[in-house]
Amino acid sequence: MQRTYLAFQHNAKLHSLQTVVRTVTSFASLEEANKGLFKGANEEDHVVVTEQTIFHPQGGGQPSDVGVIKAASGASFDVSAVRMSQVIEGEVLHFGRFTDASSHFKTGDTVTQTIDSEKRNLYSRYHTAGHVLGAAVRHLLENEVANFDELKASHFPDSASCEFQGLIEGKWKDSIQTRVDEYINQDMPVEIDFWDEDDFRANGLERLIPDRKAMGMADDEKFRVVKIKGAEVYPCGGTHVDSTQLCGKTNVKKISRSKGISRVSYLLP
């Protein structure tokens, strides 16, 4: 089975896409490993797999898109969650429920996907703002905090934060906010590119080279990177706004520390 083509990684402005149904599976018939991806499911729920998708699956700290998939026959499927399969590498699972239980898709049906644009924009703003915050903290503190490194981030609106190795004291909060404000106000362009290992090395970013085998990538595939022009580059599969100013005011909420890890949380209006 081929991997699902992630159309949103190549054109995030696509909020509607025509594609073809590969499989439709009732929740009860899912493999156990995939059942565990969807909490609170019941016998009315299904998973639809398509050749391409504009739905961002939950991952990389970003929530999944939601929306609807419709066929010319009138069948309609409300997508409430999207995940990467735990069984078939690279397959995207659209989880939800058919509007009419008696009207389903069939393999080979042409369907139209439509995402919730308002939520996509919110998640994109949060994701870009997280990169802005990470860049601000790195540029301020990588030479000030012992053993500093960027670790992981959550771009969920109710729990957005970036984690760093090393102890970041509370006294840095105002300086971080000032630097974040500068990056937002400079309206830095946010660009998508595709790099191989040599591109990372050429830009002095060996530390960011992803693990190709762990990601299940072929030797000739390139890694998707997100560039905030004038700030930082990050390997990233998520969705973003076109410039830092489109994030809106990014408020640094607090800095918490535990077991050598510092978490800087943030909030958008």
Image (tube, rainbow, N blue to C red):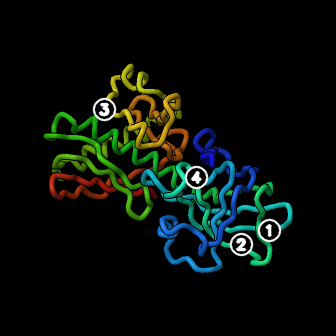
Provide the residue designation for mark 4.
91
- Viewer-nearest residue: 205 or 128: 205
| Mark 4 surroundings within 10 Å by alpha-carbon count, few (fewer than 14), some (14 through 19), many (20 or more) | many
Q: Which residue lies furthest to the bottom in this view?
A: 43
What's the residue at 86%, 65% (across, down)?
73
Q: Quadrant of residue 94?
A: bottom right
> Callout 3, which amino acid?
Arg
Distance in Å between CA atoms under marks 2 and 1: 7 Å
Distance in Å between CA atoms under marks 2 and 3: 45 Å
Where is residue 168 shown, x and y percent of the image? 18, 48
Distance in Å between CA atoms under marks 1 and 4: 23 Å
Where is residue 167 shown, x and y percent of the image? 16, 49
Distance in Å between CA atoms under marks 4 and 2: 20 Å
Provide the residue designation for mark 3.
207
User: Which circle marks residue 75 in the picture?
Assistant: 1
Can residue 67 be seen in the rendering of this structure?
yes
Q: Which of marks 1 and 3 is nearer the N terminus?
A: 1
> Callout 1, which amino acid?
Ala
| Mark 3 surroundings within 10 Å by alpha-carbon count, few (fewer than 14), some (14 through 19), many (20 or more) | few
Circle 3 — which element? helix
Q: Does 210 sit left or right of 243 as displayed? A: left
What's the residue at 58%, 58% (across, down)?
65
Can residue 122 be seen in the rendering of this structure?
no
Where is residue 218 shown, x and y percent of the image? 51, 34
Provide the residue designation for mark 2.
98
